[in-house]
Amino acid sequence: MSTVFDKIIRYKARKLARAHIKRAVDGLRYGGHFNFEECQREVDNNYWQRKSVNLVFDMAYDGPWYLLGANDAVKGRRRFDVPAYLKGWRSQIADFSFDGWVNPRIIQQYGWIDQTIGQQYINTKYQLDQLDWESAPYDKKNRAG
């Protein structure tokens, strides 16, 4: 059961995360440099983080970063090295790979994310190689060009 105190902590954590995300995005937009270590110090010194029990603050703080990472993966970009951001990014890429999606540009730029995605690619490629393309029905409407 969630208490009012936990709700306040979650609110404060999300607010701080959104402020850090805004700082990070503005830094990229205007050619500055984003340093997550400064943000981590702010989190560590935050009053609400110190009063938090059962990782309420940490989970609420990580939520906006996780969502940003997942959204960036959908858009085919990766901008930050924040742990929660990377977790969201990897999770979305893994979801795509389980659905059979492989983006060569992402692979070329970032390499294989982890062994799971690499194995999914190998499995998909193997299944495509096993198809009998010669006996597939021909439809003029589906012809490229």
Image: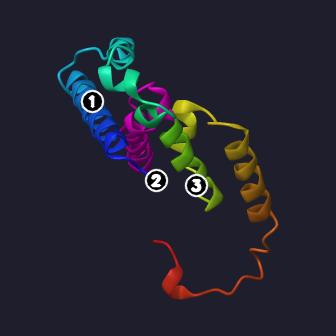
Across and down, in percent, residue 60 comes to 39, 39
Do the residues bearing badges 1 and 2 touch, measured as CB atoms within 8 Å? no
| Residue tagged 1 | 16
N-term-proximal mark, 3 vs 1:
1
How many residues crowd around disc 3 within 10 Å: few (fewer than 14), some, or many (20 or more)?
few
Which residue: 56% across, 35% down? 108
Prevalent SS, magenta region: helix
Residue type marked 2: Met
Where residue 95 is drawn, which disc sits there? Answer: 3
Residue 65 falls inside the magenta stretch: yes
Relative to residue 94, is residue 40 depicted above or below?
A: above
Residue 99 falls inside the magenta stretch: no
Residue type marked 1: Leu
Residue type marked 3: Asp
On the picture, is 121 further left or further right than 51? Answer: right
Q: What element carries label 2?
A: loop
Hey, which residue is sitting farthest left in the picture? 30
How many residues crowd around disc 2 within 10 Å: few (fewer than 14), some, or many (20 or more)?
few
Q: Quadrant of the C terminus?
A: bottom left
Relative to residue 40, is residue 48 depicted above or below?
A: below
The magenta stretch spans which residues? 59-86
Which residue is at the front of the view, 2 or 28?
A: 2
Mark 1 → mark 2, Cα distance in angstroms? 24 Å
